[in-house]
Amino acid sequence: MSAPLPERLARVKPLAAFVAALVLVLAGLFLPGIVGAAVLLLLVGGLAYVSSLTWRVQPARTRVLRVAILALLAAVAVAKIVG
């Protein structure tokens, strides 16, 4: 049986997670219209889920930064859909 998600995520190297997120953000920004917006919205959903797993143990400043980044990514995705 596989380990729970938080345990699997704890084994991921931080650099690998950063590079993967960066690649997804850049893909979402450079892909046209709805495709790019879909990539960004999937990323927002995944990051929101991972943030919810660690929400209770994060300092308030980190929580604010995470919410701001997620809101910015979601706003960019909506702008890509509308425009």
Image (tube, helix red, strand yellow):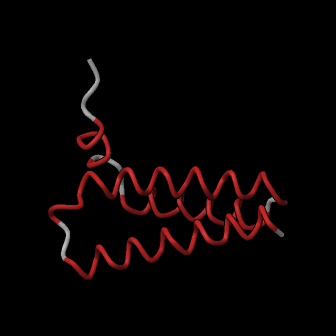
- Find residue 72 and report its horizontal and vertical position in percent: 55, 75
Quarter where residue 43 is shown: bottom right
Q: Residue furthest left?
A: 57
Vertical position of residue 80 compared to residue 35: above or below: below
- Find residue 49 and report its horizontal and vertical position in percent: 38, 50
Is 34 displayed left or right of 4 in the figure?
right
Q: Residue furthest top?
A: 1
Q: Residue at x 25, y 29 (%)?
A: 3
Q: Residue furthest bottom?
A: 61
Q: Quadrant of the N terminus?
A: top left
Quarter where residue 76 is shown: bottom right
Is 11 displayed left or right of 49 in the figure?
left
Q: Residue at x 23, y 57 (%)?
A: 54
Q: Quadrant of the C terminus?
A: bottom right
Number of numbered discs overlaid on the protein picture: 0
Q: Residue at x 48, y 68 (%)?
A: 70
In front here: 49 or 14?
A: 49
Q: Residue at x 67, y 64 (%)?
A: 77
Is 34 displayed left or right of 5 in the figure?
right
- Find residue 7 and report its horizontal and vertical position in percent: 23, 41
